[in-house]
Image (cartoon, helix red, strand yellow):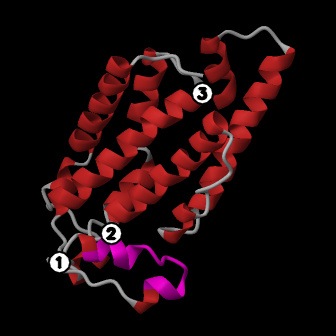
Amino acid sequence: MKNTSKKDDLLIFALSYLSGIITHFVALSNVIKNADCWQYSSTYQSGAWEVSIGRWLIPLMDMLRGRLNIPYITIGLSCFWISLAVVFFSDIFGLSVKYSLITGGLFVTAPWICSVISYSYCCDSYALGFFLSVLAVWCIVTLGKYSGGGICSGFYNAFLCTVSIFFGMYNSVNDICAHTELSQEDRYIYSIN
């Protein structure tokens, strides 16, 4: 499973984070806003509408943030959670440092991440939900514990699909590798095709 050292994990995290900060600098500097951000410019108080659609952890994160919408904090936290998810994702699939760095760049620059980060008033909550979905799969794969998968849906219900997709991907790659002679490098390439 583990194909990198702690030093390599730190490098993967740092370069993923730096890629995220550079990629999302325009949102970070508050130059470009989407329509929702004009409404929630400096303060944001989540409430009943999030809870009514199943996003019950967003009000808690909002409260912990002091109900402030400060883009360099929320986007910085988002990049932190996504970069941490990259480290765990790399561990799940046993990726080498080279492929982990490529994966980190792809994760933080993915179109859905750019879309999520454009909602600076709640993007840290969504990024934490994404990290928790990757962490849930990591717990299942490395610890054999089937707990924690549902907590990610408290931020955004679609993250249960993320858990399912990553776990399905992991099982498919392992089944294929059990019946063939694939190296660690080939496992990753096969999993994305």
Residue furthest to the right in view is: 179
Q: Would you place residue 130 above or below residue 61 in this image?
A: above
User: In the rendered structure, which amino acid carries the disc numbered 2?
Assistant: Cys
The kind of secondary structure the magenta stretch mainly shows is: helix
Mark 3 Cα shell of 10 Å, populated few (<14), some (14-19), many (≥20): many
Sooner in the amino-acid sequence: mark 1 or mark 2:
1
Secondary structure at badge 3 equals: helix
Q: Would you place residue 140 above or below residue 184 in this image?
A: below
Secondary structure at badge 2 equals: loop
**Magenta stretch containing residue 62, yes or no?**
yes
Quadrant occupied by the N terminus = top right
The residue labelled by disc 1 is: 41
Q: Where is residue 162 in the image (x, y as percent from the top left)?
A: 60, 52
Residue at 37% in and 53% down: 114
The residue labelled by disc 3 is: 93
| Residue segment shown in magenta | 50-63
Residue at 65% in and 14% down: 186
Sooner in the amino-acid sequence: mark 1 or mark 3:
1
The residue labelled by disc 2 is: 122
